[in-house]
Amino acid sequence: MMNGKSQAYKAFAGSTIGASHLKEGTACQDYSLAFTDGIMAIAVLADGHGGADYFRSDRGSRFAVESALEGIREFIRIRGEIQTAPPEQTEYEHLLRHLVKNILASWYGKVEADYTKDPPKPEEMEKVSEKKKQRYQDKDALYLHHAYGTTLIAVAISADYWFGLHIGDGKCVALYPDGSFKQPIPWDKRCFLNITTSLCDDDAAETCRIYFGLEKPVAVFIGSDGVDDSYPFNENEQYLYHLYQTIALTFADEGFETAYQHVQDFLPALTGKGSGDDLSIAGFLDMNALKETAQIQRSQPDDRDTFVSGT
C-alpha cells in the first residue's frame, strides 16, 4: 500500500462574474472548487457556454466541478489503498480514461435530475433557436444535457503522481523547481476563438485530454478562457506565464491565506480591464518548495505590485 502525504501542497480556487455579464444582468457561468487534506490536493474549474441555447450552463459548470471533485477524491483514495508499487504511466492513463467516464456519468446524472425536478421555464426557452427548442420541449433524452454545456479542467496531486483532465478551452500551466513553465496537457485544436469542445459532446469521454506525470511541479495553475482572452492572442503564452509567475511569487512572499485573498480581489479587476468574461483561476502549490523556486523567479521580470493592486 502506498498512501503517503502530498507534502506541503495547498489548493485554491476563485471565480468571478464577467464585467460584461454584470452589465447585461446574466448569471456567472464559471464555477471552481479546491480540496486539500494532506493526502491529495485538487483544483477544478468549469466554464459554462452561456448563450440562449445553453440556458442552464451555469448549473452545468457547477455540476461538472462537483462531479470531478467527487470522482477524483475517490480515485486517489482507492488507488492509494491498493497501490503496492510506483505507478506506471500507461496503466494510469488507462485508469484516468475510466475516471473521465465516471465523471461524465455523474454529470449526466446531475443534469437529468435537475432537468426533471425543474423543467425549462417559458422565459428560459424564449430565445432558444427553433431547432433546439423543439428538442428540449420533446425532452429528447439524448439532447437535454446540451442546455447544461460546459468545459472542464481538473488537476490533482498525490504523494506519488499528479494528473490533469481537460475538456474544452482554458489553459493549464505548471511551474517546475527550476523556474520553468510548461503547459503539460495537450491542446485541442478544435478550440478556437468562440468555438470549444464540451462535456455535452457525444465523444467527450474519448477526446478529453489527459496528462499523467511523476515529476512533481512546484505549482499548477488552471484558468478559464476568460483569463486567456484578457491578454493579446499572439503573446498569450508569455502573458500567462508572467501572470502565474506573479501569483506564485505572491504566495511565496505573503503566505497562502493572504495571497489567496489577493487572487480573489484581482479577478474582478482582470475581467474589468481584460476580457469582460466570467473567469476563474485555481491550482495547487507546494508552499515549501515554492520559496526555493521563488529565488530563481526573482531574477525574472515581475509586476507583483500591479497584481496586488489590480491596476
Image (tube, helix red, strand yellow):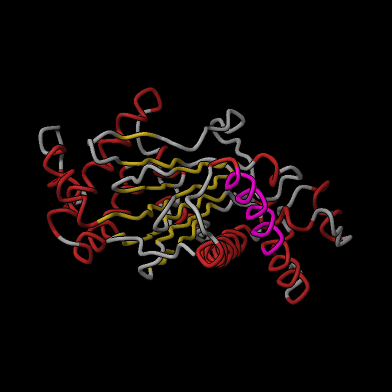
Q: Residue at x 65, y 61 (%)?
A: 56
Report the side of 11 relative to 23 (left or right): left
* Residue in the foreground of this view, choosing between 203 and 27: 203
Residue farthest toward the bottom in the current orientation of the protein: 117
Q: Residue at x 75, y 69 (%)?
A: 115
Query: Is 99 contained in the magenta span?
Result: yes
* Residue in the foreground of this view, choosing between 248 and 59: 248
Which portion, as a residue range, is magenta?
A: 91-106
Query: Is 245 contained in the magenta span?
Result: no
Report the side of 185 relative to 90 (left or right): left
Q: Position of residue 11 (x, y in %)?
A: 35, 61
Report the side of 119 relative to 88 (left or right): right
Q: Position of residue 203 (x, y in %)?
A: 74, 42
Say if 185 sits above or below 232 in the image: below
Q: Main secondary structure of the magenta part?
A: helix
* Residue in the foreground of this view, choosing between 29 and 303: 303
Q: Position of residue 205 (x, y in %)?
A: 69, 47
Q: Residue at x 52, y 32 (%)?
A: 187
* Residue in the foreground of this view, choosing between 199 and 272: 199
Say if 121 sits above or below 31 in the image: below
| Quadrant of the rendered image containing residue 260 | bottom left
Say if 173 sits above or below 125 in the image: above
Q: Residue at x 39, y 43 (%)?
A: 227
Q: Position of residue 140 (x, y in %)?
A: 86, 58
Residue farthest toward the right in the current orientation of the protein: 138
